[in-house]
Image: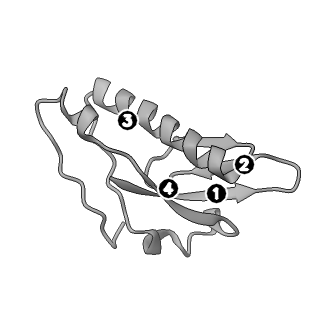
Amino acid sequence: MKFPVVVHKDADSDYGVTIPDVPGCFSAGRSFSEALHNVREALALHLEGVIADQEQLPQVLAIDVHLNNPDFSGGFWAIVDLDLMPYLRNTTQANTIYPTDSP
């Protein structure tokens, strides 16, 4: 599954990464590449918790839906790809997730 992420960088800080479609899941890194790597790990851990709690997986929206959100202004957009199959194997019900253009 491809998750849109937004990366912010202040002059005196590391790169911070937010996943708009997964509230509460974020990460950081000293470089842009490290930040993207770290957010994949954070997302994997977050999804493990979602499955363990038997909650529904997040619905991923297209980047275009988030572009005008002021919370993400000034950030760099990227796509993080994460295979969801390991998380779905342990569930009795699999929810199909497709990117959409609407919230």
Amino acid residing under circle 3: Leu
Mark positioned earlier in the residue sequence (3 or 4)? 4
**Disc 2 target residue:** 31
Q: Is residue 91 above or below residue 75?
A: above
Amino acid residing under circle 2: Ser
The local crowd at label 1, few if under 14, some if 14 to 19, many if 20 or more residues have their Cα within 10 Å, is many
C-alpha span from label 2 to label 3: 24 Å
**Disc 1 target residue:** 7
Residue at the (15%, 41%) spot, across then down = 94
C-alpha span from label 4 to label 2: 20 Å
**Comparing marks 3 and 4, which lies closer to the viewer?**
3
C-alpha span from label 1 to label 4: 11 Å
Asked which secondary structure carries label 1, the reply is: strand
Mark positioned earlier in the residue sequence (1 or 4)? 1
The local crowd at label 4, few if under 14, some if 14 to 19, many if 20 or more residues have their Cα within 10 Å, is many
**Comparing marks 2 and 3, which lies closer to the viewer?**
2
**Residue 53 can be seen in this image:** no
> In x, y percent, where is residue 101?
34, 73
Mark positioned earlier in the residue sequence (1 or 2)? 1
Mark positioned earlier in the residue sequence (1 or 3)? 1
**Comparing marks 1 and 2, which lies closer to the viewer?**
2
Asked if labels 4 and 1 touch by Cβ distance under 8 angstroms, the answer is no
**Disc 3 target residue:** 47
Q: Is residue 12 above or below residue 91?
A: below
> In x, y percent, where is residue 67?
54, 73
Which image quadrant for residue 46?
top left
**Disc 4 target residue:** 20
Amino acid residing under circle 1: Val
C-alpha span from label 1 to label 3: 20 Å
Mark positioned earlier in the residue sequence (4 or 2)? 4
The local crowd at label 2, few if under 14, some if 14 to 19, many if 20 or more residues have their Cα within 10 Å, is few
> In x, y percent, where is residue 42?
51, 36
